[in-house]
Structure formats: C-alpha cells, structure tokens
Image (cartoon, grey):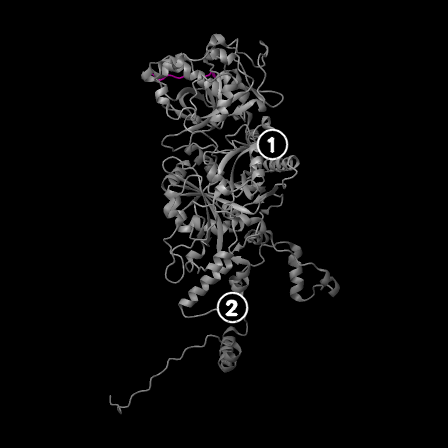
Amino acid sequence: MGTDGSKQPNKVPVIPPRDLLVQKFTESRAPELESLYSTIANRMNNNFKSRKNKRRRTTGYDDRSSKTRFRKKQKIGVSNQESDENAEKCVKKAPPRHIRRRKELKMNPESGFCPSGDGTKRLRTHVWHAKRFTMTKRWGFHLPLGLPGRGRGSRGLLKWLKNGTVVHDASYYCAVQLEGSQGSLLSILSTVMTPFSSPDAGNVLSGSAYASSMLHYAGAHNLGPIAPVFYMWRPNQQSTDADSESDGTIRQLWIWIHAAALTEGYNALKSACERQGKIDEDVAVVSCTSLEGQLGTLEVMGSKASQLLRRILHPVSSMSEKSSVLRKCTFMVADGGTPSRNTSILDNEDHISSSGIISLTVCDPRALTIEGLPEVSSELISSCTDLWDASKGLCCAVEESVLCMEKHRQRLSSFCLTDKSSDGIHASTKIRSSRFCPVLLLRRNNMKDSIERWSIILPLSWVKAFWVPLVSNGAQAIGLRERSWVACEAGIPCFPLEFPECGSYSSLMDAEASAIDKEASLRPVSVRPFSIPIPPPWNCVRLAFGTNPTEAEKTRVCSSESGPVAEPALADSDMVVARTSSTLAGFLNSINGDHLLLFLHFLDKTTCISKIMRDEKILESGPSTVSLLANRCRKVCFVRVILHAYKEGVIEDGAVVCAPRSADMKLWLSGSNKKVELQVPQSSMATYFVKQDSGKWEFQVPEDPAAMESNRWPIGFVTTGFIRGSMKPSAGALCDAVLLAHLRHEQWSSVPLNRRKKEIYVLTRNLRSSAYRLALATIVLEHQPEDLDHI
C-alpha cells in the first residue's frame, strides 16, 4: 500500500477521567436510554414486577397475624397514620443485641476491661477466645478454660511446647504501684514479703531484674501467706550509679498479684503503707495505687519463643543492662531511615540473665505486614511515654480500620491511583493514637529441655495489636487448663492449684467441688460415683506417726466410736508450706530436727547428696526419728515434691501419697516377674474419707482386719497429676517434711550403701482407685534454694 512519505502524527492515548459525573453522562445519553426503556417496556408489556418464584422472602420469618394485617392495610393505603405529636414522642428502636455487643467489644479504650451484664470483666482478646475456647467465669473475669472437648489434647500441647511456641493472655494479673522514698519502700517490703532479700538483690534494686516472694499481712505472718508475687523496681534516672542511691531517693515499685488474690493483696499493701506512715511521721507517706485495667501481660513459652519475638518486636529504644538509667539508644538504621529488620535486642539473648527485665519501645507489629517499619526520628523517640507512667495515660494503638484503609491506599497506589477520601480519617486518628508502644520484656526461668519463657508487659489497649501477630506467626493460644499442664510438665507450681496455704486455693476448690456435685446430681443414683474430698483433707497427714499395723491403735487420732481423740485437728494456721530452704531450716530448728535426712540446698554447697548418702555414720547422728515424731510441735511443715512412677501407673489430681512398709519395698523391688498389687478393699473405698456434718472431710481409721492390713498412712496429697503424652510424666505433691525424712532413714537403713537413692519411695493411690502404686519422690528444695517461681 502506497504512502505519501509523510510521517503520521503521534496519537496520544486518551486517558479516561478519574471522576465521572453521572448527570452529564445521562444528559448526553438520554435518547439512547429512552429507546432502550421503550424496547424493554414493549417486551414486558409495561409490567415490571418480578416473578413470584424470583422474589425473596425478606419478611417470611415474621408470621404474626397482626404484622401481616398491618402490612396489608399499609399496602392498600387505609392504615391509620400516627399524628405528628405522637411521631415526635416515638423513641427510635435500639439495634439488636449482637450488633450492640459487637460494637462494644470492638472498642479499644485506653484503660479498663469491658464488663458483661453481671459485672464480669472481659479480656481484650475475649472475642478471639470466645469463638475458639470454652469460657469460664473465674476470679471476676471471663477466662478461656481450654480448647473444646473432653479436656484432653495434652499431647498436641507438648508438641507445640517442644517444637514451637504457645501464648497465653495473662492480663488478669494486676500490678500494685508503690511510690515513695527508697528507705520506706524497703521497710514495707521487709514486713510483707517472705523472703525479701534475693541472691540478685543488687540487680533487683537497680531495676534490671525482678524477684519473687510470698506476700503476707504486715505483722501477722501467723495468718498465712496471701499469694506468691513478683516485684520490680523502676530504674532510677537521677543517677547512673546504683551504689550512689540513698534511702531518701524517690522510687517506684510494681508488685504483680494474681487476680484470685488481688483484693486481699492490695488491702495488705495499703494497710502496710498506712502503718508505715504512722510509725515514721517525718517521712512522706508511701502511696499505694492499683493499676488494674491499665497494663496487660502476654506469656510466650516454647523452644522457639525467641525466634517468634524477633519477628514481632522491632525496638527503637532500649535500656542498657549494665546501667540503671534509661538510655535512648538507636539501633542500626538501614537506607531510608528505618531500622533494619534483622536488628533485635534478642540477638544477644545469651547475655540476658534469667529474671532479667528489658525496657523497649517497639513498632506496631501490625504495621510490619502492611508497609514496613515506620520512619523513626529522634524527636519521635523522645516523645514516647514510658510504660512506668501508665497512671498518667498512654497512647492507644492505631485503629484497625485505619490500617485497613492504609492497606487499601497501598493497593491503589500500585495501580497509580489515589484515594483522597481517606486523608481526613487518617489525620484525625493519628492524633489520638501512636505507632510505637513501650513494653517491658521479662525473661523468666527456663523450663526443662531448653524451653524458654518470656512475659511481655504492655499497655492494655495494645494487647489485641500484639495478640493477632503472635498467633498469625505460629504461636498456639492456650487457656487455663493448658497453662497448668505446661507448669506440671516443667515442674513449676501453678497458682492457686499448688498453694493450699493461701485463701485463694480454698475458694477455687470450693467452686470446683460445687461444680462436681452439681454434675453428679444429674446422674441416676445407680450410676452416680461416690464422693471424694475436694480439697484433700490435709489434716489427716498428722495421723501417719507409724507404718506398722501394731501401732494402729496407738495412732488412732480420728473421731471414731471405739477410740478417743488423741491429737487435735490441723487448722489452716498450723499448716506451713516451706517454699524456701531458710523456712524449712527454721522449722527444723524449732523442733530440734537438724539431724533429719533433709539436705537443704544452701547448707553445704560444696557437698552433694551423692556423697552424703555414701557416709556410713549419717544414720547414727541425732536422736531417734520415732521419738521426734511423737514429741514434735503442733505445726506440720509440708514441702513440694516431684513424683515419678516407678514402673507403671497414672497419678491423678488429688491422689493420696502414703508411706510404704518394709515388706512392700521388698516385694516391689525384688525384681520378680510376678505382678505385685496392694489394694484397698472395695467395701472400704467409699468410707476411706468421711464427710462430717460441718462439711469437712476426715480420714476414717479402718477397723476391719483386712482393711487394717492394707491401710497405708497418708503423708501428703497430689496437687497436679500426670500429663498424658509426656515422655517422662511427673506429678507435683505436698508431703510432710518430717515423715519424708523418716521414710528416707528407714529405706537407707534396709539397703547397702551402693543401693541408696536420692529419691524417696512412696505409695500413691487415686481416690477412685483401690490399687497402690510405687513412686519416687524428689524434694524440690534439695535441688534449688527457692520454690517461688510460679506460673
């Protein structure tokens, strides 16, 4: 095809306008629209009604005749219209409950929990948990009990713990803030804490570590402890040297208390502060403030906990571990003015000691998945509020709608499009929120098999902002039931399940007993199981003075028809649980029992138990243990032990721990293939523990010869049973310290030196089972100086 040789002009592509005016479009296309309408009208015969089979029954659910008649009248135009005056008085109908509840739970106020109708508080992650977990009302909160089902799933949990990470919302823990002079605070802590001093007292006072202790009433230690707590000091910003701090320095202190004992613990601290002000009138009064509803806590546990925290926490400032002053240190900055993603303070986690505290200001973890880390400037870092100033108010996290709008704008910008409608929303929300959050990162004592424990303390309004990224990055959420499994697997006591000396334990056990009784009452009498004591009758431990059948009549101290009461019942104030080596040593000193075979951790650090048990003269020192049992004081001291099954058997919660006889040991340890079973007669199982008219349970001394022969005296009870699926299942129990020493003395006396064991042989029996099982008991305080670390 020929051409004239001239160049064709470059045609500029026509770009459609960004905005389209509907009115001008319809005016220009009016003839076409009219012709199209006429064509459709001719085809439909001017009948634009939809077919009946195509209609949607939008009001089909409402079958009330009155509504139907009203709609018919309204349709034909004969319905009575309300007058204008009545229309003005008509109140607008409230939206449905699910809409109001969803709007309420999506709110993210700066502080406080959203309560339900009966006043029960909800966690900030309540909606997330309520869709996936079985919820329960406990300690004034709606808390996730566990995954739905029959209460199992421990095998999967142990796999997550060993090969992954689990996370738990522990925002029901509350901090009580004490503020005053350093000398006054130390004086108050010495009266309400047992023990008060710790091996790492210098780091605790400087604010780089926390310490655990038992909280008591000031001047009333005989009433028993309130709860285990852990406390931390705010780093002193006035001096860079901790040694130059004086007693007059104004300091700030946080004491974290479980929700089960919050009211009692806060009252004890407040009364101690008031008492201190009356004693020292010249010193300023120490203020005691509850920070309930202002701070939240997330617990991260597992072998990959550090890896998960590296992906979530991107700090912009931190506190030096060697100094007590909060330093604003900027991390490596990549090109573009943003912190590098590979930079994290957890890269040097080996240098972070156990019980250490790290103060950080981190970026919003949700923003990391949208458009990367925000730009960081020195002015922005200096303007971030410290977490210790939570009582003055902290900025909330950016709303989820704003982040969604930013994500929408980011997608539009990839198509070279802009959305001007979202600028106003972003600007108005930016003033009331922040993209940086101050947190406190606590490294807890590691569990066995290198399983790490971390706690993230953050503002309550930021809990949901951190929860979703943690779960999205592979962390498995757990409830209260799974949390107790983790504690049992790690050998850590769980409050309040393993603290019978505290009042919170009785309240929890009473609620559990009521639930079990209510469930049993729904069954027919023919299939209803016999009742078991909840909580266990700790007073019956006093009965185990001897293990020979001939001594049964001498040790009969329960209320029975054939014998008088020779020993008073064990009251709550007479029950002492030794949580530290110093407490146990003080009790042994009070009863002249220093010679007992209880090898405390701090008594001889150079000599181990393995060397002591090889000493031939170790059994000859001191008076007779039997005489000590007969003349000991009124109080009974319990110690926590870890139980392992000798060969087979499952130890359940509430199982009784008994003292074996020498004949039992010979049969079990003889090595014969014949299975040896020691059982309680079926006729006496239901009467082993008898419930009195007062509601308390007592041990019933057997009178039948067969029952007396199979009777083994109780020395303690199991607080947490075996976990299904564990490679080496263990159970936690509390046993009488003197009786354990007596058993060790008998067992070491009956075997050669080379066959002595550090563990103590005991018998365990589940309350609904008739068979005794042999188990090995390990005293915790013989391997560590304190047993205060709780979960």
Res. 421 mark: 2
* Quadrant position of the N terminus in the picture: bottom left
Mark 2 vs mark 1, foreground winner is: 1
The question of residue 375 being in magenta is answered with: no
Residue 604: image quadrant is top left
Residue range of the region highlighted in magenta in the rendering:
674-681
> Residue 173: where, in percent of width, then height?
53, 41
Residue occupying image coordinates x 46% and y 51% = 327
Q: Taking the image as drawn, is residue 241 in sight?
A: yes
| Mark 2 and mark 1 residues within 8 Å of each other at the beta carbon | no
Residue occupying image coordinates x 33% and y 86% = 9
Residue occupying image coordinates x 35% and y 17% = 675
Is 149 rendered above or below residue 473?
A: above
Judged by its main secondary structure, the magenta piece is loop
Kindly give the residue lying farthest to the left in the view shown: 1
> Residue 510: where, in percent of width, then height?
57, 30
Is 465 rendered above or below residue 528?
A: below
* Residue that mark 1 sits on: 218
Left or right: 723 in relation to 239 = left
Q: Secondary structure at mark 2?
A: helix
Q: Taking the image as drawn, is residue 226 in sight?
A: no
Kindly give the residue lying farthest to the top in the view shown: 550
